[in-house]
Image: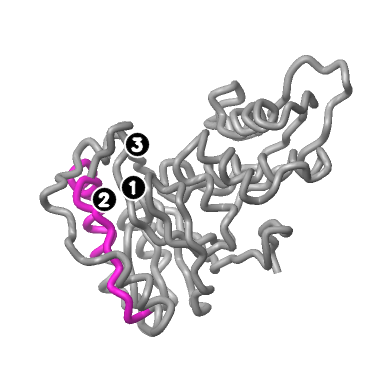
Amino acid sequence: NKREDGYHELASMFQAISLHDDLLFHVLPADAEEDQLECEDPNVPLDRSNLVLKAIDVFRKRTGRTEKFIVKLKKRVPVQAGLGGGSANAATALWGVNQLCGKIATNEELADYGAEIGSDISFFFSLGTAYCTGRGEILENVSELMPTSLYIIKPKEGLSTGAVFKNLDIASIEDRDPLKLKETLEQESIYTAEFVNDLEAPSFKLCPKLADIKQACQEAGFKVVLMSGSGTSFFCLGEPYRDFVEIFEDRMKELFDVDIYQARFLNRKDGDHWYLQS
């Protein structure tokens, strides 16, 4: 449902994964007039529209700190993929500058700062697996999911989140209780859970090729195939059929011109640690 503030009421399972960007932070000299953001990817805006710089602005506003920072960003997460790459970087910026300022804000306060910038930024201050409601900013930690093979399939086409929600038919959304998914993940298996993404239908309407990609992944034998967020990437859990293992990636790239990433689930130990590769 759409709220009075213009956002839709959401109920979603979020999971952090190992596909990531790199961010390196330094405090600039005291006479620095503004923050600096460096990135070699020409598709990344380096002005104040970037969520990283917005996050630093909010941190200063909420804490009263005055330091300026230089941030070096190396992009790996594809854009317009529904993977939350920009939101993850904003959360990391909040975490990083807070560390450089002596950990003056708590984990809960940083999550609150994130909610001021974007709906799903707060998620990254969970422990990595969370049930999110509201507009995405209200989070409840969930037990870590069982390890499994994870493939991310990303076509070259991208869709804006706004366009996808604009084409969402509220009357046609699934009536299954999202809490049932949460309970299944906690009590049974990731493979027995009934995954649903109500944003698939409007995304497929805007980009029919997406439906063909999903079908091809299902026919390859993955246990779970679902679009991530508002797309256009898909996550596939498990492995393809034995006959497809050697040819799956080449075939998908040939048929649909996609990028394929292998990743894994990622969780934090506690609120005092950020996400680390192991």
Is 237 placed above or below 168 here?
below
- Tell me how far mark 2 sits from mark 1, CA to CA: 6 Å
Mark carried by residue 181: none
Instruction: Please state the horizontal and vertical placement of residue 241, each as a whole percent of the image.
Output: 35, 82
- How many residues crowd mark 3 within 10 Å: few (<14), some (14–19), many (20+)? some
Magenta residues, start to end: 191-215
Q: Residue furthest left?
A: 171
Look at the image and name its color scheme. Answer: one colour
- Is residue 2 rendered to the left or right of residue 83? left
Q: Which residue was labeled with disc 3?
A: 160
**Residue at (26, 73) in percent of width and height:** 219
Q: Earlier in the sequence, mark 2 or mark 1?
A: 2
The mark nearer the N terminus, 3 or 2, is 3
Classify 99 as above or below 254: above
Residue at 59 percent of width and 62 percent of height: 127
* Cα distance between the residues tagged 1 and 3: 8 Å
Residue 17 lies left or right of residue 33; in this view the side is left
